[in-house]
Image: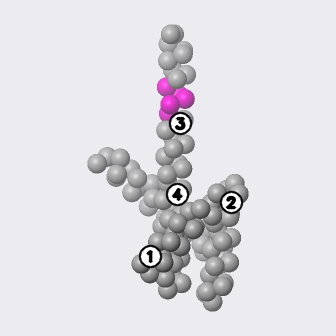
């Protein structure tokens, strides 16, 4: 195997690793977002955990993160707590940073 082939395989492994990390971070962010939203809607314990799992699953409905935001806007409105999409999106960005930090600390341990 040539040096070029070795480098190509290394780049492929790095890309795969980066994609797996991003998937885990997005899923963790969605769980954190679901728990945050559940708390604002008065859900606790198992009900909050179940709701967070629903939010994680909502991300698979269509490409991108908009499906999660739309779901949360709808759920907040139904709970009598209307919240703008931009507010949810901003909190989502903050939670993505937290999710990445949590995953990195788990990897290091």
Residues tagged 3 and 2 counted as in contact (Cβ below 8 A)? no
Disc number placed over residue 27 in the picture, else none: 4
Q: Return the residue nearer the eye: 48 or 89.
A: 48
Residues tagged 4 and 1 counted as in contact (Cβ below 8 A)? no
Q: Which residue is mark 2?
A: 61
Quadrant for residue 91, please give it. bottom right
Q: How far apart in space, not on screen, are marks 1 and 3 (Cα)?
A: 34 Å
Q: How far apart in space, not on screen, are marks 3 and 2 (Cα)?
A: 23 Å
Lower sequence index among marks 2 and 4: 4
Image-based side of 70 in relation to 99, left or right: right
Determine whether the residue tagged by mark 1 lies in a helix, strand or loop: helix
Q: How far apart in space, not on screen, are marks 4 and 1 (Cα)?
A: 19 Å
* Residue 82 visible in rendering: no
Report the mark closest to the observer, 2 or 1.
Answer: 1
Determine whether the residue tagged by mark 4 lies in a helix, strand or loop: helix
Residue under the image location 45 percent in, 54 percent down: 100
Residues tagged 1 and 3 counted as in contact (Cβ below 8 A)? no
Report the mark closest to the observer, 1 or 3.
Answer: 1
State the residue lying farthest toward the top: 2
Residues in magenta, as a range: 10-14
Q: Return the residue nearer the eye: 47 or 62.
A: 47
Residue under the image location 64 percent in, 57 percent down: 60
Q: Is residue 11 magenta?
A: yes
Q: Return the residue nearer the eye: 14 or 97.
A: 14
Q: How many marks?
A: 4
């Amino acid at each position: 195997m040539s040096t070029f082939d070795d480098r190509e395989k290394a780049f492929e492994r790095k890309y795969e690793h980066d994609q797996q990390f991003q998937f885990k971070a997005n899923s963790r962010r969605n769980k954190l977002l679901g728990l945050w939203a559940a708390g604002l809607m008065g859900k606790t314990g198992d009900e909050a955990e179940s709701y967070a799992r629903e939010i994680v699953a909502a991300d698979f409905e269509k490409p991108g993160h908009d499906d999660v935001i739309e779901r949360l806007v709808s759920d907040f409105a139904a709970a009598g707590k209307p919240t703008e999409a931009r507010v949810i999106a901003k909190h989502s960005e903050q939670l993505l940073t937290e999710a990445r930090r949590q995953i990195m600390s788990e990897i290091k341990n």
